[in-house]
Image (cartoon, rainbow, N blue to C red):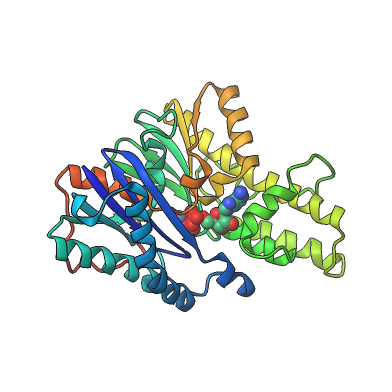
Amino acid sequence: MRVLGIESSCDETAAAVVEDGRVLSDVVASQVEIHGPYGGVVPELASRNHMGKIVPVVGAALDAAGISVADLDGIAATAGPGLVGALLVGLQTAKALAFARRLPFVGVNHLRGHLLAARIEGDGERPDFPYMALLASGGHTGVYLVEDERRISCLGGTRDDAAGEAYDKVGKLLGLGYPGGPVIDRLAEDEGDEVDLPQALRQRRSYEFSFSGLKTAVAQHVAARGGRLDEGETRALARGFQRAVVEILVRKLVLAARERQVPRIVLAGGVAANRGLRRHAADAAADKGLTLFVPPASRCTDNGAMIAYAGYLSLAAFETSPMDLAPRADWPL
Ligand code: KG4
Ligand code: ZN
């Protein structure tokens, strides 16, 4: 079964073709340069840009897979959560194609896409069910119990900022550009001095997070130095920030896995591309006798393959969506 998946929930226009769970093509057009000067995603600009890119990106995904629309068995698109105007572009494109070609159509939950990305075939070792997953992206941060393709429950989330949002805000504070995550990851790479920063809710036996205090602590540290840090100070702050985020994320994920006696842990979402997080999770897993699964970085940040894969699972189970399906800004699992 061949499924086209379209993703346009935020600042990536993406499309991919999956055949029986394997990726034939995966094309992503990033809008980072458009939003960069504003230090964050501007929703109106995102929608406009998706409109210009969606047809070429879908065409490129079909070309790269070596197929045409006539070879598809179904079409999937992200229906939420995300920016409504941005979602609308991918969703309507998917519906129009499905309607014109009389193909089944299904709307996919973006979080479900991220959480099942580790199960895509052909990328490496896949986790069996059940697994405990950390989803950390620009819009969401939480610990999820994934019992199977359908039964996914959130055990705890962030009370305020998402982890990726904290990376981006700190990146902006340090004048590192948008998105801050990959830059801070690079700055934190070498060993050296580290600024000691607080980890909220560390001793709580809950799977909740809070990152707004950490962001404030970084802002105060910068302000105390007159708003200007030299390169050494910037690196020390980046290291301290990365440690604080990564340690608390892994701590809660491991706590959940142990308490629920789930032997497998999985990283998902844009922040899972972080090298420090991957290393720390690998160490913690080895230490606690858990098996860690991490998708390739390109399947952690927003992509079409995870939507095509989740859509394929739904369509293979004869699950479709009505043609009047509306995008949803909020859509908890
Ligand atoms: O999953 P994603 O592409 O989009 C959302 O669904 O939000 O995640 C984007 C987030 C951004 O906040 C970005 O800064 C962060 O993921 N990110 C990273 C890294 N790469 C992307 N954060 C930390 N380290 C990275 N290497
Ligand atoms: Zn995402």
Name the side, left or right, on which 288 lies relative to 73. right
Q: In which quarter of the image is residue 167?
A: bottom right
Q: Where is residue 315 in the image (x, y as percent from the top left)?
A: 19, 47
- Look at the image and tell me in which quarter the N terminus lies: top left
Q: Which residue is farthest top?
A: 289
Q: Residue at x 46, y 45 (%)?
A: 299
Q: Residue at x 29, y 39 (%)?
A: 149
Q: Position of residue 193 (x, y in %)?
A: 84, 44
Residue 140 appearing in the image: no
- Number of labels in the image equals 0
Q: Which residue is drawn at 21% across and 68% down?
A: 96
Q: Residue at x 18, y 58 (%)?
A: 321
Question: Compared with residue 33, is residue 315 higher up or lower down, i.e. above or below?
Answer: above
Q: Where is residue 305 in the image (x, y as percent from the top left)?
A: 38, 48
Q: Position of residue 270 (x, y in %)?
A: 52, 51
Name the side, left or right, on which 268 lies relative to 183. left
Q: In which quarter of the image is residue 175?
A: bottom right
Residue 47 appearing in the image: yes
Q: Which residue is farthest left?
A: 102
Q: Quadrant of ligand 2?
A: bottom left
Q: Nearer the viewer, residue 174 or 74?
A: 74
Question: Compared with residue 279, is residue 84 higher up or lower down, i.e. above or below?
Answer: below
Q: In which quarter of the image is residue 281?
A: top right
Question: Compared with residue 127, is residue 29 higher up or lower down, i.e. above or below?
Answer: below
Name the side, left or right, on which 36 lies relative to 291. right
